[in-house]
Amino acid sequence: MKIIKAIAYKEIIHILRDRRTLMLIILMPMMQLMIYGYGINTDVKHLSTYVYDQDRTYLSRRLINAFTQSQYFTVTLQANSLQEMYKALDKGSAKAALIIPPNFTGDLLKKKGAQMQMIIDGTDSTPATVALNSSQAIVNAFMQSEKLIPVQVLPIDFRPRLWYNPDLKSTYFMLPGLIGLVLQFLVPMITASAIVREKERGNIEQLLVTPIKPYELILGKILPYIAIGVLIAGSIITVMHLLFVVPIHGSVLTLFFMTLIFLVVCLGIGLWASTVADNQQQASQIVMFFAMPSILLSGFIFPREAMPLWVHHIGYLIPMTYFLKMVRGIILKGLGFMDLIDQVWPLLLMAALVILFSIKRFSKRMT
Amino acid sequence: MPDIAISADKLTRRFGKFTAVDEISFEIPYGAIFGFLGANGAGKSTTIRMLCGILAPTSGNGKVGGFDVQTQPEQIKGVIGYVSQRFSLYSDLNVIENLNFYGRIYGLEGNTLSGRIKEALDLTGLAPFQKRLAGDLSGGMKQKLAVANAILHHPKIIFLDEPTAGLDPLSRRSIWELLYQLAEGGTSLFVTTHYMEEAERCNTIAFISQGKILKIGAPVDLKAGLQGQILEVTCRPLMKASHLFSTLEGVAGVTVYGTTLNLNVTDPPSVEARVRAAAGKEGVQVTSIRSIPASLEDVFSDLDTKNQGGFSSQQLESKKQ
């Protein structure tokens, strides 16, 4: 125990003296928070829209107004020709174009079936889908409010509601997941570097002839990084809650416990990488190699439900898949420990496997 | 406590088909400095690794500090000190932090630890530099720190793997003074080195080549074995003469020393005549020929000839800095 303490203490001095790692530990989580909190916003709002209103009546202006008020579209220009609109769409300065023909109001009043058209830039499928659906809804609402269609009593009173994230804020979805992303990147990287460094600089040669046991060395080196991981997770949660006002519905204690399990998995990956790599550069490359699929296949950004079945299954092998369900479940849905049991046991199993495997490998390399 | 600190009895280590250390045997008493000499790859490091308890021998026995290298490697680690060839302490930790860390690893703490650290700092003269980062120390001071580090837990046996490699003569001398002090205190030192004059300082030296110990004994005895067999020839041109003389009958080896050649010969008077005759014929100008006492370098050169191909004095030569 004293030996483990001595190693951990020495490791803390290393960390505090290593400016580069220290900056990485502090800056990376905050940078990611800013990027995902402010920058990567998948909420589709204020889509730049060109309007070619050939009708220019009270009704056509009301219709345009309905589009603007929805917040999904912002009229950036009143175009004067179709040519002008097509050009803007080609160039990308307009993401949507609304065309109202000259006889729009006339046809409406004659109940002849008026026509109008919306063109949406479908290059990026996500905003395009949102724009398509909302344009439909806007026009329907407009027809009702202008009493252009009779108020009907529908045979099914269908009331869909959004739970957990009713405003569909992407920060609610992204930021809790960020805890997983940052830990998955940072923790294995710094752990692997710390262990490989001893090999690289020859320190291990001296340690080998001391009575240190492999498990003492591993524990002593890992403990400070568990603390760092907890600090990182804590700081992300704090900033997420205070700055980006993401509500935390579940228990912070449960969240802490789950984070701890995930941390052990991350440390294990780092430990394993350190037994494979000969220098710090290799170690970080190995960690990167594992982090990339974690980001793409775990459901951090892209929904796993949309993936082909075999890719979906690969996701089950990725620790972050489970952790994401845990953090999102606790923070957004207020789930408790027992609600997450299906995620807890696979992650615990992974933690045990990766730690046992890497300690075994590590001990072998030490002798 | 027995008088023997380190003993090896037919200690052998194989790596697959390759025999790195081949049935070596020796005994080192407490308080002795044992010099282990050999070219790179001769088996020095493998021997040290076996004796330090980090590599199990394939066969044979060894005892270090009364513990068996086969069955008690962990106990051995507790009673030995180790100074590695490459600086392997933490360069981003200062002198005190390094010593504190290793002291704790050996189970020292509190007043005992601070007492031992002070003692080690005083002995090595590092006290004024205790707040300096190990990485900022000079080469000599780094080695002193490594020694200070190795003596914290008062080991009775210390292994030093080329402790003076790459150091300036002054630092080398002060390291050796340190080693003498330790040996006087009853500690036995197992030192590998490439420097001849350092080998002379050891109580016993052993030459290892291709995993076998070729010769073992006190430097004086080893040199005495070559008594009257070394001829110093002053001549020009040196390299031509060197090649010429090495082909002569009765010449076992030729070593170049600055402006002279040392000939390792079997029958000095007859060789001297042959040398003069050959020199006259080939246009080599001989100024003087005299019989001199053998140096350790000559012992090397002698071993080289008797063990053709295995023990290369050229290789050792190139190691001299």
Image (cartoon, coloured by chain):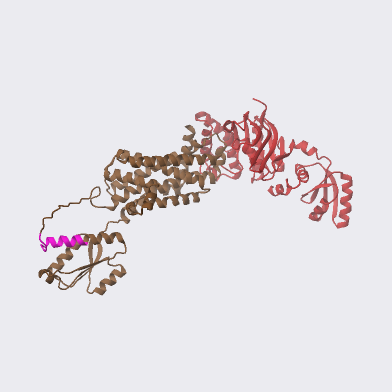
Chain colours: A brown, B red
User: Residue A197, image x and y in percent?
Assistant: 51, 45
Q: Is residue B164 left or right of residue A196?
A: right
Is residue A149 highlighted in magenta? yes
Kindly report the secondary structure that dominates the magenta region of the rendered protein.
helix
Residue drawn 32% across and 56% down?
A39
User: Residue A311, image x and y in percent?
Assistant: 38, 52
Is residue A118 highlighted in magenta? no
How many numbered badges does the structure rendering display? Answer: 0
- In magenta, the rendered stretch is A135-150
User: Residue B104, image x and y in percent?
Assistant: 51, 33
Q: Is residue A326 left or right of residue B20?
A: left
Which picture quadrant has residue A45?
bottom left
Q: Please identify the quadrant where the C terminus of chain A is shown.
A: top right
Q: Is residue A33 left or right of residue B171?
A: left
The answer to whether one can see residue A292 in this image is yes
Q: Is residue A163 left or right of residue B314?
A: left
Which picture quadrant has residue A73?
bottom left
Q: Is residue A83 above or below residue A250?
A: below
User: Residue A8, image x and y in percent?
Assistant: 46, 38
Q: Nearer the viewer, residue A99 or B132?
A: A99
Q: Nearer the viewer, residue A10 or A81?
A: A81
The answer to whether one can see residue A16 in this image is no
